[in-house]
Amino acid sequence: MRYIGWTLLIAFWMLLAGILHYTLPQKDVVRIVNTYEERQELNDWTRVFWSRPDAQSDELVNRDVQFIQTVQANGRPMVYRNEDTGWSWPPYFKFDTANLYTQAADSVSAKDAPEWYVITHYGWRNEFLSVFPNAVALRAVAGPDAPKGTPWVNIIVLLTLGVLLSAIWVRWRRFRRARIDPTLEGLQDNWEAAGDAVEARRGKFRRWLKSWRD
Amino acid sequence: MALIRVFFIVLVVLSVIYVSLSLYSRARCRDKLEAEWDAGGIADPRDRFVRDGLKDYDGSLRRKLILGVYIVPLMLVCLIIYFVNFA
């Protein structure tokens, strides 16, 4: 029973951490290599990793998606998709996909004359599932080691969430102490009282038996 | 349309929060008034004192501040839209 409780607890926190890690914005310093469009099939469960830019796209089984090819400061490749999030989840309300695509195409640089950009994105890259992070914003920086800036959005969101969760937790504990614990203790007291009564009666019976032997 | 769907869902959720919060806030105000009367020293009868106090509460700023339940998320969405698309 204790193992089930722990498993559920760990699963819950890992799920929450995963959702936050996927949804909150992250920043990479990259050099943009190219931009391209590719038709994507959207008819299996990996659909959840693509956006729903508008209501029409809900019914499509495939559509063209824009991509931004980049090389990171450490030399590794990273490919971002560039899609409107529209009014759906996650709540980035991104509508400027075409503008960002133009900006990215305008920011292409060669290896021997690199220009570095901080690309703000959310989501994960997974080669096996063909999942790409969604680029949200682009900003020029001095070099590959340039600071990415303070992640204010993450700080605010995580703080708010922490305050909210601890408030709920405190109230739940107070409720449990005031309402549930006394009830359970009452049950236990009754149970123990019943046990004591049985014990007492048995003791009396034993004494009576013993009185015959003596 | 996606916008209308989101608008509708958010409106329903926020309305539930708004109504619960209004009821809770008014009930707390009533509790406070009753405790104040029970502490003694008030000439008015209890129910009239509480009724007058609640009438004051109905016109108070505190009650209007609960409208922030609608306004704050709306401002937040506008802010996000501005920063993501136009800043």
Image: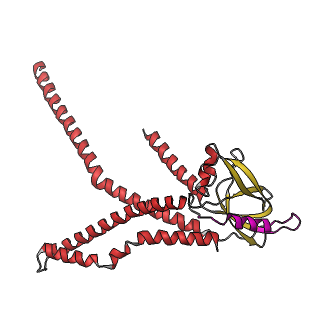
In this rendering, position of residue A21 left or right of residue A189? right
Residue most toward the right? Answer: A112
Q: How is the image coloured?
A: secondary structure
Residue A113 coordinates in the image, percent (x, y): 87, 68
Res. A150 in view: no
**Closest to the observer: A62 or A174?**
A62
Which quarter of the figure is the N terminus of chain A placed in?
top left
Residue A6 drawn in magenta:
no
Query: Could you tell me which residue is drawn at 53 percent across and 63 percent down?
Result: A158
Res. B47 in view: yes
| Relative vertical location of residue B24 with respect to residue A199 in this rendering, above or below | below
Which image quarter: residue A109? bottom right
Residue B87 coordinates in the image, percent (x, y): 64, 74
**Closest to the observer: A132 or A148?**
A132
Q: Where does the magenta region start and end?
A: A93-116
Residue B30 coordinates in the image, percent (x, y): 23, 70
Which quarter of the figure is the C terminus of chain A placed in?
top left
Residue most toward the top? Answer: A213
Query: Could you tell me which residue is drawn at 43 percent across and 69 percent down?
Result: B70
Number of labels in the image equals 0
**Closest to the observer: B7 or B47?**
B7
| Relative vertical location of residue A193 with respect to residue B65 in this rendering, above or below | above
Residue B44 coordinates in the image, percent (x, y): 12, 79
Residue A108 drawn in magenta:
yes
In this rendering, position of residue A30 left or right of residue A177? right
Which image quarter: residue A208? top left
Query: Could you tell me which residue is drawn at 13 percent across and 29 percent down?
Result: A204
| Relative vertical location of residue A196 with respect to residue B51 in this rendering, above or below | above
